Structures are given as C-alpha cells and as structure tokens.
Amino acid sequence: MKRIVSLLLTLVLALLLAGCGSAQAAGSDNAAVPRDSGDYWNTSADTNGADEDYNMAYDTAEPGAMEGENGETQTGKPAKRIYTGYMEMQTLDFDAASSGIDALVEELGGYFQQSSTSNGNSGYRHASYTVRVPAEQFDTFFQKAGALCHVTYSNTNTDDVSESYYDTEARLETARIKLERLQTLLAKATSMEDIITIESAISETEWEIENLSGTLRHYDALVDYATIDVELSEVYKLSGQDEAVTTFGGRLGQSFVNGLKAVGNALEDFAVWLAYSWVWLLVIAAVIVVVVRIVRRKSGGKKFSLKRKAKTENTEPKE
C-alpha cells in the first residue's frame, strides 16, 4: 500500500510538471515516478529544478488578458470574446418590421433562440426576440436592424474570456495525460488493493475531463455566436422625432406644446381603452343595475311591511 501511495503522489507531481507544456518538465517523469520507494525519497533535489522550469513554462503559457495585434493574445492564440447586445425599437408597420428582422437573421446566418409576440390592451403589438448571429456579424446586425426600425435604445457588451478559456484547455490536456498514465499503472497493477485505488483515481479523472470538456463547449457556443435581445413595439407615432431646442423661449414653448401633446395623448389612450374595453364596461354596468334594483326592491318591500303594520295597529279598537 505504501508503494502505491508513493506512486500516486509522484504521479501527481509529474502531471503538474507536464500540464503546462514544458518539455523539460515532461522529460523528468522517469525520475519523478520511481521504481522503488528509496528512489522516491531521493528525488526532492531533482524536482526543485523541475518546479522552477514548470513555473516558468506556466507563466509563459498563461493566457493573459492583454492582447497583441489582430485580436490575438500574447501567446499568439486567437482571443476568445463573448459579444452580447440589447435593442429597443419602434415601428409603424409591425408586420414589415417583423419580416425584416426574420430576413436579416437568416441573411447573417443566425437563428432565433427565443421569439414571442403579444397584443397590448391598447391594441398595439409587441415582440421579444433573442437572436444568435455569428460573432463576426455582430456589428452588422446592429447597423441593419437600425435601418429597419426606429431604435430608441441600444447597448453592447464584450467579455474577454481568453484567460479562462485557455486555462480550462490546459487543465483538460493535463487531465488527459493523467488519465493515460493512470491506465498504464492499472495495467501493471497486481494486487486487488492497488487496482481498486487506481480505478478510483481513473473515475475521478474521467469526471474531471467530462466537466472541463463541457465548459469548453459552453464557451465555444457563446464565443462563436453573439447573443442579442431585441424588443420591438408597434406605435402610432415614433418617439424622439422632435428637434432639440436650446433657447429659453424655445424650451418654454416646447414644454407648453409637449404638455398639450401629453394631455391629448392621454385622452387618445383613454378613448382607445374605452373602445377596447366597452364589452366589459357594459357587463359591469349591467351587474351594477341588477344589484341596485335588488337592493331597492328589498328596501321597498321592508318599508311597505312597516307601513302596513303601523296601519293595522292604528285601526285596532282600543279597550
């Protein structure tokens, strides 16, 4: 058992040396995985130099956040960026705008991750989209979508995940090397106790490989295709069409006009709401009329009973 523990500990040290791609560290594996326990305890002086080589190799292979030219990291690898965006748009012709967005997404080689359309109480329609387009078409989508509709708000964000991506990639490669060497040890194991210990380490390594592979697949999906959330509203008048006024008199007059417009818009919205809700208003009015009549009948019947009772008492002969 001590022999196996020594082998496993030495194997972990050897994998750390090999994980960052250092050829010198990889060449020291034979010294790091001894044939007997005596050799293991004599490797401390040799591995100190290997650790320094490992640290140097890791520092040079580290995918830092600083980038070189042409969108590459300092290591010469392409930068990994996640592009996300958000747009709020208005249109007077909802059908044409919706069809235009569909055609634009298809033209750019993208797809709709989510899409929904609803009708508001005012009768105007609203659509929500989550669009995925190739990362290189991210800016193009914003430009062409802005030409299709009236954009009231837009926002873009770029998240550089190069460091996390290449760190995960390096850990995955290290885990694969570790798995190969564990399988080699398993083939040479003779005792049942050794076999069980190594198989347990293999299971953990396989789980780590699957987890790291899933993380890379998730990164690739986000990096390859940008994500854009789009809100499209149908309106009877586009907002923000008036020119800005800078003088005091102009601002005062504009405020007065805007106040009148706000009142007019409120009255229009109220009229539209009445037109949309007239059926419910009739139902509510009918219910109120029925309730009032029932209450009046009950109160009228009660008054009639009281009057009749009083009349009867007055007509009875007194003794």
Image (spheres, rainbow, N blue to C red):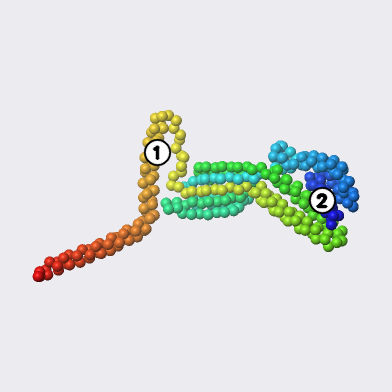
Residue 16 appears anywhere in the view = yes
Taking the image as shown, residue 32 lies to the left or right of residue 90, namely right
**Circle nearer the N terminus (2, 1):** 2
Please state the horizontal and vertical placement of residue 169, each as a whole percent of the image. 74, 48
Q: Is residue 182 above or below residue 75?
A: below
Residue at left offset 35%, top offset 57% = 281
Residue designated by label 2: 9
Residue 164 vs residue 32: left or right?
left
Report the amino acid beneath label 1. Answer: Asn
Q: CA distance from mark 2 to mark 1?
A: 77 Å
**In the image: residue 186, left or right of residue 98:** right
Task: Give the tally of numbered discs.
Answer: 2
Residue 258 numbered tag: 1
Check the image and report above or below for 260 versus 180.
above
> Observer-nearest residue: 163 or 67?
163
Q: Is residue 244 shown above or below 165?
A: above
Give the class, few, some or many, for how many residues have Cα within 10 Å of label 2's Cα (few <14, many ≥20): few
Q: Residue at x 87, y 49 (%)?
A: 40
Closer to us: 36 or 252: 36
Q: Nearer the viewer, residue 109 or 28?
A: 28
Q: Quadrant of the C terminus?
A: bottom left
- Res 149 visible: no
Q: Residue at x 47, y 49 (%)?
A: 234
Image quadrant where one finds the N terminus: bottom right
Query: x, y (%) of residue 105?
Result: 59, 50
Residue 84: quadrant of the picture? top right
Q: Say which of 297 and 1 sits in front.
A: 1
Residue located 46% across and 40% down the image: 240
